[in-house]
């Protein structure tokens, strides 16, 4: 690993626009989801940095033109992001695989190592 | 989802119960004709909580947090739907009113709102089979799939019943206020019926998953207590229904053996009965014994109490139980009561006396096709030594029994029947 690179990883949670949520969850299922996310965050507490959800509000600027909507491609929605600070990309992958949607075929999670170019 | 894992920092069923509380509060504010809008808003608020709470931790006042989010959702929905909402006159007013308030509410007001919603589900405009579905959705926070699973109905049927309830309420802008005791009292029997159905569905349904069944019993008791705590529920039949529910629940776990097989009352380990629940049930039963009213809930609770208080199966006061079934039949006539009374009489005076009662009964055809009818006849014939008739009825019961657990039980009895017939044959050979 080059020394300029950061040990932080940006994880973008994408969901198939049509398939998310696949069906409206019941309150009981939502409680189970909450418990699962909470357990994941507690387990990797030391490596997870605060992330956030993303609202559907947004815009796209392209060549000075602004269009509504956050989606450059409408097939997928980036619904939230997480930041992981850990030793390697392999470890980041391991953590993401363990998260509640890590195995969900409707979700894809892009993991990118931060460049740390800002100094 | 059947398994309920303990959630860190949250009470069991928190989301589900919070759904019921918030929909009740919002529907009081915005009208039950907008219940669907309120449901969607609360659903969104809960979803927002799933996304935010694991990350940021639980807010200090979770309920207020959810309420604020849901309230904003409702207001947004009202503004968007202004042109299509037929009762739109009040929208500007509602929006302006809610703009200034803090979003705090008192616990007892929330209880009143839920109670009010319980009476809304008993609205006579809503078809009976829709009432229970609506209560499970709105007050208990179950989804259509979860209700279908619990009531053994198809998803489509549940959905249609729910829609029927909602459309009946669309024209009900003036739903009852809790202060309107006269109107509420007229709905009390329907409310009790909903709770009774909820409970018996959980207690005796063929649903193999015990957790799921127990959940329905818990819900019925929770709503029953809500009713009982309010002056509107100060009627003796409310206490009687609660007595019945507690006394039955006390025996819930002892009805199955270690492998999930059904145990008859006679075989149950009475030390596994929950003494604390029995005590609560008995005190409700005492509370129910006032005034003139004697309902089916009184009779059924008194029967349950007789069983709970009997030290052994043999020492059960069968004459009293037979008498109570007769009283039950006088307030709520059904040949099933006679069937049950025959069992008590057989224990008291012998199988022949029980059989005499059943043979004298003009059983309707639906009863003749009911597996418990054959199961009871089969058992009584077996005890009276008529193994031939016993085998006929037990075989018929075995064919019609709805669950594997019940089939297993009947198969054991059939086996007992063939051993008993061997023994009878032996005895006859010896004496003949």
Image (spheres, coloured by chain):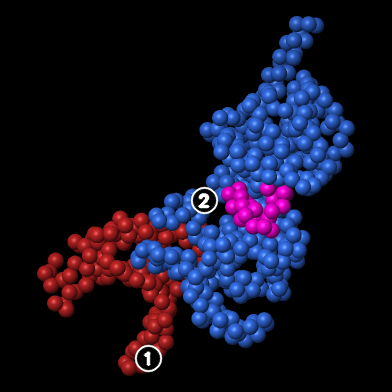
Chain colours: A red, B blue
| Image coords of residue B8 (percent x, y) | 39, 55
Is B243 on the left or on the right of A89, as rendered? right
Q: Is residue B305 above or below residue A87?
A: above
Q: Secondary structure at mark 2?
A: loop
Q: Is residue A11 above or below residue B132?
A: below
Work out how far the residue at label 1 is from the one at label 2, CA to CA, in angstroms. 48 Å
> Any mark on residue A66, and which?
1
Q: Secondary structure at mark 1?
A: strand
Is B388 on the left or on the right of B88, as rendered? right
B232 and B192: which is toward the camera: B232
Start-end of magenta stretch? B217-241
Residue B111 position by quadrant: bottom right
| Image coords of residue B401 (percent x, y) | 69, 39
| Image coords of residue B277 (percent x, y) | 58, 40
**Residue at the image point whose x is 36% and y is 86% from the top:** A60
**Residue at the image point whose x is 75% and y is 64% from the top:** B183
Is residue B369 shown to the viewer in this render? Answer: no
Judge the density around disc 1: few (<14), some (14-19), many (≥20) Cα neighbours within 10 Å. few
Q: Is residue B307 above or below residue B174?
A: above
| Main secondary structure found in the magenta portion | helix
Q: Nearer the viewer, mark 1 or mark 2?
A: 2
* Badge 1: chain ID: A
Which residue, given by chain and number where applicable, does mark 2 sit on?
B2
**Residue at the image point whose x is 75% and y is 25% from the top:** B347
A36 and B291: which is toward the camera: B291
> Any mark on residue B180, and which?
none
* Badge 2: chain ID: B
Q: Do marks 1 and 2 both belong to one polypeptide chain?
A: no
Is residue B83 shown to the viewer in this render? Answer: yes
Judge the density around disc 2: few (<14), some (14-19), many (≥20) Cα neighbours within 10 Å. few
Residue B248 position by quadrant: top right
């Amino acid at each position: 690993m080059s020394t300029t690179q950061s040990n932080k990883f940006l994880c973008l949670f994408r969901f198939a626009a049509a398939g998310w949520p696949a069906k409206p969850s019941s309150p009981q299922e939502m409680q189970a989801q909450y418990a699962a996310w909470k357990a994941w965050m507690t387990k990797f507490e030391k490596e997870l940095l605060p992330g956030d959800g993303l609202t559907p509000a947004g815009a796209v600027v392209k060549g000075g033109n602004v269009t509504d909507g956050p989606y450059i491609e409408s097939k997928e929605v980036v619904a939230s992001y997480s930041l992981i600070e850990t030793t390697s990309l392999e470890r980041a992958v391991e953590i993401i695989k363990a998260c509640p949607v890590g195995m969900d075929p409707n979700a894809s999670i892009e993991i990118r190592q931060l460049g740390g170019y800002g100094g | 989802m059947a398994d309920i894992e303990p959630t860190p920092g949250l009470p069991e069923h928190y989301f589900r119960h919070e759904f019921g509380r918030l929909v009740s509060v919002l529907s009081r504010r915005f009208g039950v004709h907008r219940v669907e809008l309120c449901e969607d808003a609360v659903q969104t608020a809960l979803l927002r909580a799933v996304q935010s709470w694991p990350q940021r931790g639980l807010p200090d006042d979770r309920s207020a947090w959810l309420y604020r989010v849901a309230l904003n959702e409702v207001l947004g929905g009202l503004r968007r739907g202004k042109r299509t909402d037929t009762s739109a006159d009040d929208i500007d007013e509602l929006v302006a009113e809610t703009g200034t308030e803090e979003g705090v509410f008192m616990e007892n007001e929330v209880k009143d709102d839920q109670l009010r919603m319980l009476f809304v589900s008993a609205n006579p405009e809503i078809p009976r089979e829709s009432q229970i579905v609506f209560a499970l959705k709105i007050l208990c926070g179950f989804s259509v799939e979860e209700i279908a699973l619990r009531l053994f109905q198809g998803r489509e049927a549940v959905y249609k019943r729910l829609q029927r309830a909602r459309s009946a309420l669309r024209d009900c802008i003036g739903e009852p206020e809790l202060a309107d005791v006269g109107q509420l009292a007229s709905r009390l029997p329907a409310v009790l019926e909903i709770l009774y159905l909820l409970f018996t569905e959980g207690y005796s349904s063929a649903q193999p998953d015990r957790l799921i069944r127990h959940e329905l019993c818990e819900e019925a008791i929770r709503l029953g207590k809500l009713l009982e705590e309010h002056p509107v529920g100060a009627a003796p039949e409310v206490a009687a229904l609660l007595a019945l529910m507690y006394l039955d629940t006390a025996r819930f776990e002892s009805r199955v053996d270690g492998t999930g097989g059904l145990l008859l009352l006679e075989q149950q380990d009475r030390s596994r009965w929950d003494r604390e629940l029995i005590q609560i049930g008995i005190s409700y039963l005492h509370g129910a014994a006032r005034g003139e009213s004697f309902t089916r809930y009184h009779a059924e609770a008194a029967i349950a109490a007789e069983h709970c208080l009997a030290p052994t199966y043999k020492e059960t006061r069968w004459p009293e139980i037979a008498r109570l079934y007769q009283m039950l039949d006088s307030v709520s006539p059904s040949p099933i009561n006679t069937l049950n009374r025959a069992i008590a009489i057989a224990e008291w005076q012998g199988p022949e006396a029980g059989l005499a009662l059943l043979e004298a009964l003009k059983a309707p055809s639906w009863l003749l096709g009911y597996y418990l009818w054959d199961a009871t006849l089969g058992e009584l014939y077996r005890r009276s030594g008529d193994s031939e008739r016993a085998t006929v009825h037990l075989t018929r019961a075995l064919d019609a029994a709805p669950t594997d657990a019940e089939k297993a039980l009947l198969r054991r009895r059939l086996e007992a029947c063939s051993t008993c017939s061997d023994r009878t044959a032996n005895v006859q050979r010896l004496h003949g």
